[in-house]
Amino acid sequence: MKTFLKIVLVVFVVLCFVSLATQLSMYYWPNIPAVPDPGAGRTYSLNNHGRYTYMNRNEYLLHEVAFWTFIICLLGTGAIEQFLDPFDHKRRPRPFDPNLPPWRNRH
């Protein structure tokens, strides 16, 4: 079970990074025009730091899917790490024990 959770966790982290990279790269695509073009289907606006660019339907759907993939994978990663702990982070010794006075915390 722990091996399966480790695989799922790694997949979530990779998907999180890929979706974040896709989200960020959309602001720098050179072929997205700054004026709407209904004939080409570029009617979906993207606020690029106060400068609007206009996407077509496929780019808009990619933007939305990447956003929700990032959110779901981030929440899934956090939940698996917090509640299931497949890499046993909670059992590892901590470098500083908050219950000890500072002069007794030595590595």
Image: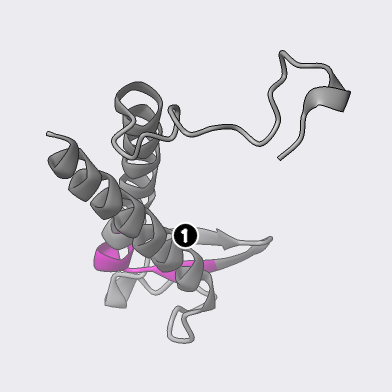
Camera-side residue of 86 and 47: 86
| x then y, percent, for residue 23 | 44, 62
Residue linked to disc 1: 45
> Of the residues shown, which amino acid type is indicated by label 1?
Ser
Other residues around mark 1 within 10 Å, as few (<14) / some (14–19) / many (≥20): some
- Which residue shows up at 34% across the image and 21% down it? 83
Residues shaded magenta: 53-60
Q: Which residue lies furthest to the bottom in this view?
A: 30
Camera-side residue of 39 and 12: 12
Left or right: 56 with respect to 32? left
- Which residue shows up at 35% across the image and 39% down it? 77
- Which residue shows up at 29% across the image and 77% down it? 40
| x then y, percent, for residue 12 | 29, 49
Q: Residue furthest top?
A: 99
- In what element is the residue under mark 1? strand
| x then y, percent, for residue 39 | 29, 76
Q: Residue furthest right?
A: 103
| x then y, percent, for residue 14 | 32, 59
